[in-house]
């Protein structure tokens, strides 16, 4: 049994980023950039008006000005703004030569068919200067950025219509155990419905992976080996649940090795999720999670998502919120790092969800996040700031 931090370190050293591919801009949401992106132009590409108004010389404020032309956005000015003159200019329009100020239309009195006068007491320049946001050749997005809507706007503005991103991980999910039946079936007295596989499918899809479910491996070495080999032939990460504790039918570790995977660790000093296997085969990975649904849910969030982040090259920070504990939290056993569900209260604190153990997946229906209590710690006092990992 190793520490959780040691398990993360092993995964860090084992993970190799996937290959990259070019995709359409409209398909790249939540994907991770595999190369830096540079601007192909200055932004803005010219001095442009920030308001609807009149472009003039600041020295002429207060004078009656002759309107030379109207310049909508997208049109190149044709007239030089000289003393006593101005040009009507729309928001986003190019500032004409000679002008150094745009007076807002609200601050203007129309004095004739082609004359105006500035009537306010003062004005800002009201235009954006060329390249004040981005200069040509400047790096605008960094390799490893997970693409969000605001990043897509940047990609579009610099002409990156086919960004290069890491490929999506292919995840193959397998459940094990003769006691399992699929959700549409009515379980016999000794059976339970297979909830883990569908939970993991949803978690994998939410992590922006291509996820496939390969079914239930029955409790024989032959059946388990066959389904592992099938999933491994089509997946970057294979996830199993169940069959890895110390029971008579828990032969899964041996079968994992028969399939050619090298087991890196088998157990962690954590609760829930002590019996977790992490194994590698070249640039493929296998994670065997416990059969208890809370254990599989939590360790997917903590371990598998970390692995996904690494192989997709994602360098976005792991955001956790620091929030005060709403009550005193205590536990009796302190030999393992523990993860427990919490919800946000109206008072701006976090409160532990009623939680009966690693089979109590219903507790997570009400959970907003997970809080950690370290080995050797038995209590978190009310008001103590804790890191909350959102789920």
Image (tube, grey):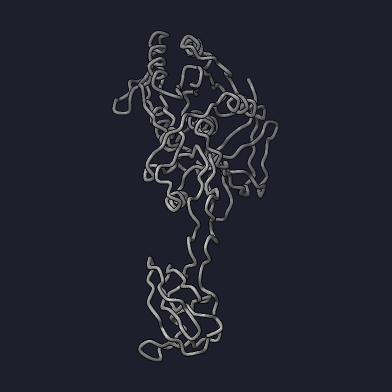
Q: Foreground: 103 or 352?
A: 103
Q: Is residue 331 visible?
A: yes
Q: Foreground: 206 or 118?
A: 118
Residue 351 x %, y %: 57, 46
Q: Is residue 358 visible?
A: no
Residue 44 x %, y %: 49, 61
Q: Quadrant of the N terminus?
A: top right
Residue 358 x %, y %: 51, 29
Q: Foreground: 125 or 307?
A: 125
Image point (40%, 68%), residue name? 76
Residue 357 x %, y %: 53, 31
Q: Foreground: 9 or 153?
A: 153
Image point (47%, 17%), residue name? 243
Residue 116 versus residue 128 in the image, above or below? below
Residue 319 versus residue 124 in the image, above or below? above
- Res 70 quadrant in image: bottom left
């Amino acid at each position: 049994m190793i520490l959780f931090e040691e398990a993360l370190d092993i995964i860090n050293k084992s993970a190799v980023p996937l290959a990259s591919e070019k995709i359409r801009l409209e398909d790249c949401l939540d994907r991770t950039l595999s190369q830096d992106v540079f601007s192909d132009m200055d932004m803005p590409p010219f001095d442009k008006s920030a308001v609807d108004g009149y472009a003039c010389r600041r020295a002429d404020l207060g004078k009656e000005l002759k309107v030379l032309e109207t310049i909508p956005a997208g049109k190149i000015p044709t007239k030089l703004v000289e003393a006593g003159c101005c040009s009507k200019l729309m928001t986003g329009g190019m500032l004409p030569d000679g002008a150094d100020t745009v007076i807002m239309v609200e601050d203007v009195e129309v004095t004739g068919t082609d004359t105006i006068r500035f009537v306010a007491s003062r004005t800002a320049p009201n235009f954006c200067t060329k390249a004040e946001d981005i200069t040509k050749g400047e790096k605008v997005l960094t390799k490893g950025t997970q693409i969000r809507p605001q990043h897509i706007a940047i990609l579009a503005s610099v002409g990156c219509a086919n960004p290069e991103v890491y490929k999506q991980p292919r995840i193959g999910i397998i459940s094990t155990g003769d006691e399992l039946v699929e959700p549409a079936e009515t379980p016999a007295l000794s059976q339970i419905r297979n909830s883990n596989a569908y939970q993991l499918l949803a978690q994998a899809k939410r992590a922006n992976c291509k996820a496939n479910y390969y079914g239930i491996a029955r409790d024989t070495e032959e059946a388990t080996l066959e389904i592992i080999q099938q999933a491994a032939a089509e997946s970057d990460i294979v996830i199993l649940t169940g069959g890895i504790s110390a029971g008579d039918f828990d032969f899964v570790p041996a079968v994992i090795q028969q399939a050619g995977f090298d087991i890196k660790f088998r157990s962690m000093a954590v609760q829930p999720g002590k019996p977790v296997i992490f194994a590698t085969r070249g640039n493929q990975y296998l994670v065997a999670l416990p059969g208890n649904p809370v254990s599989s849910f939590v360790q997917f969030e903590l371990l598998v998502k970390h692995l996904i982040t690494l192989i997709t090259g994602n360098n976005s920070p792991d955001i956790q919120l620091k929030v005060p504990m709403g009550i005193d939290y205590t536990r009796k056993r302190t030999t393992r790092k523990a993860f427990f569900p919490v919800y946000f209260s109206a008072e701006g604190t976090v409160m532990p969800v009623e939680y009966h153990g690693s089979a109590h997946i219903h507790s997570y229906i009400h959970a907003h996040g997970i809080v950690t209590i370290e080995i050797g710690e038995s209590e978190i006092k009310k008001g103590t700031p804790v890191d909350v990992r959102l789920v």
